[in-house]
Image: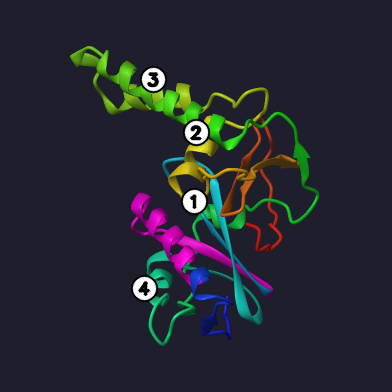
Amino acid sequence: MTVSVQSLRFADAREAADLAAFLGRLLHYDRAAAVRLQSGGGALAVFGRPPSFDVLAIRAARLADAHDFDVTVSAGELLESLSAEGPDAGTGVLPAPVTGPPWAGVLPPRGGWAERPGLPDPASLRAALNAAVTEFRTRDEALPEELRTRAERDRIGHDIWSRTVAATELPLRAVHAAQALGFLRAAPGFPVALLAAGGWLRLRTPYGSIALRRAGAAGGLGNLAVSVRG
């Protein structure tokens, strides 16, 4: 789609720096990554899909100016345009639109989110991740030479990361994605929440959200409300 906005001014230079860090992590998993940008009022929501986790990652930022646009762009070009230091700190340039990947047309619903019980605290989530990584390495090292294939390692990974967290529906891979993308921090009182809306689950932290379809849910289109809470 055509977008009239060409420049972006963030409410704080740290907003640009945090967004740059998020884009850098996405590009680590996919050097050709695209992101969908939705702006409403003074908030910008950035959606990405790290291929290793099969989830949607959402990072929000506050803008200094009110804009209203919805466009898919190159994550690399957006990252290159962001300035976190110097006279242009807290600014960026909106890249030209690109043809979006299929996931960009299938976003979570805009509203109807309700908190679900049973999510462990961040320290317990990180402990579960560490245990899963250790298990993967142990099982991988125990493979006989003839079974040391990508397919077998993928099977082990799927077995481990598809397990649900505690008594919730949230698969461990969503927590893994939150950790890898910098959303899950080790800090006293760090708030995390598990939300559900229709066929979607959402792991929310102050630094971003991980959203994914619930097991067995039918596909559908939607839009996630732009929120500076991520």
Badge 3 or badge 4: first in the primary sequence: 4
Label 2 or label 4, whichever comes before in sequence order: 4
**Above-or-below relation of 139 to 112:** above
- How many marks on residues? 4
Q: Give the quadrant of residue 34.
A: bottom left
The residue at which mark 3 appears reads as 135
- Amino acid type, residue under disc 2 in the picture: Arg
Can residue 122 be seen in the rendering of this structure? Answer: yes
Q: Can residue 201 be seen in this view?
A: no
Q: Do the residues labelled 2 and 1 touch (CB within 8 Å)?
A: no
Looking at the rendering, the stretch of residues picked out in magenta corresponds to: 16-41
Identify the residue position indicated by label 1 in the image: 49
* Residue kind at label 4, given as amino acid type: Glu
Report which quarter residue 196 is drawn in: top right
Mark 3 or mark 1: which is in front?
3
Q: Choose mark 2 or mark 1, whichever is in front.
A: 2
Measure the alpha-carbon separation of dots 3 and 4.
38 Å
- Quick check: 213 left or right of 72? right
* Lateral position of residue 27 relative to residue 126, left or right: left
Check disc 1 and report its element: helix, strand or loop: loop
Give the label, 2 or 3, closer to the camera: 2
Which residue lies under the disc numbered 4? 80
Give the residue at mark 2.
Answer: 126
**Nearer-N-terminus badge (1/4):** 1
How is the protein colored in the picture?
rainbow
Q: Which residue is drawn at 38% across and 66% down?
A: 76
The answer to which of 230 and 124 lies nearer the viewer is 124
Quadrant location of the C terminus in the rendered image: bottom right
Which of the two discs, 3 and 4, sits closer to the camera? 3
